Image (cartoon, helix red, strand yellow):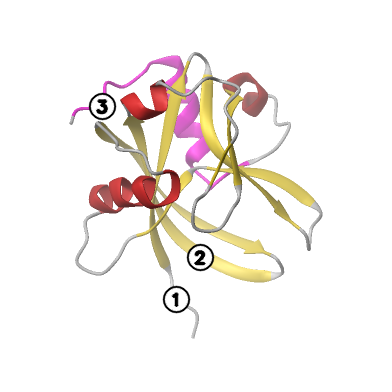
Amino acid sequence: MPAIRNISVGLPVKDGHVLVLCGRDRSLGQDFYRAIGGGIEFGERAEEALHREFREELDVTLDGSTLLAVSENLFTYEGEPGHEIAHIFAVASADLDALPLDAELEVLDEGSPVRWVPVAELRDGVRPLFPSGAPHALFALADEPVIADA
């Protein structure tokens, strides 16, 4: 029986841009963006998982985070059904703030490209942003930034 996956993802915003993973679903031929983060481990709080995931995936430290939304996401990826509960956070990080907007990064444990994308591009729907709930949280954050506490 497939399981529901609990995840924590973060939306670092800088100068009208958001740092996201760039992905492709080959079965659909669809390019997309995904908020950075991953699974919550048993006994770990969502915010702890968020900080761990940013260390593991980008080798950066988060200075603070604020929960923006919790969203249920039913989807198909590479032809397989998925179901996740996503905790979506605003994040603050001096490490990320130091990165130029043209920085070329990749997820350390699997190689997906990561880059700063203009929020306006996401508003225009050029590529979808996942998980569901992330676009709404991002647009609210970009319109009225939330101060993330340590």
Identify the residue shown where x is 43% and y is 70%: 4
Residue 132 is situated, as x and y percent measured from the top left of the image, at: 53, 46
Q: Amino acid at mark 3?
A: Ala
Q: CA distance from mark 1 to mark 3?
A: 31 Å
The picture places residue 124, in percent across and down from the top left corner, at: 70, 24
Disc 1 marks a residue whose amino acid type is Ala
Horizontally, is 77 left or right of 16 in the view? right
Q: Residue 83 shows which numbered tag?
A: 2
**Which residue carries the number 1 mark?**
3
Identify the residue position indicated by label 3 in the image.
148
Residue 119 image offset from top left, x and y in percent: 58, 22
* The quadrant where residue 143 appears: top left
Amino acid carrying label 2: it is His
Viewer-side residue, 80 vs 64: 64
Apparent side of residue 61 relative to residue 18 in the rendered image (left or right): left
Q: Is residue 61 left or right of residue 113?
A: left
Local packing at callout 3 (Cα closer than 10 Å; few below 14, some 14-19, many 20+) is some
Q: Is residue 69 above or below residue 17?
A: below
**Mark with earlier residue (1, 3):** 1
Q: Are marks 1 and 2 in contact (CB under 8 Å)?
A: yes
How many discs mark residues in the rendered view? 3
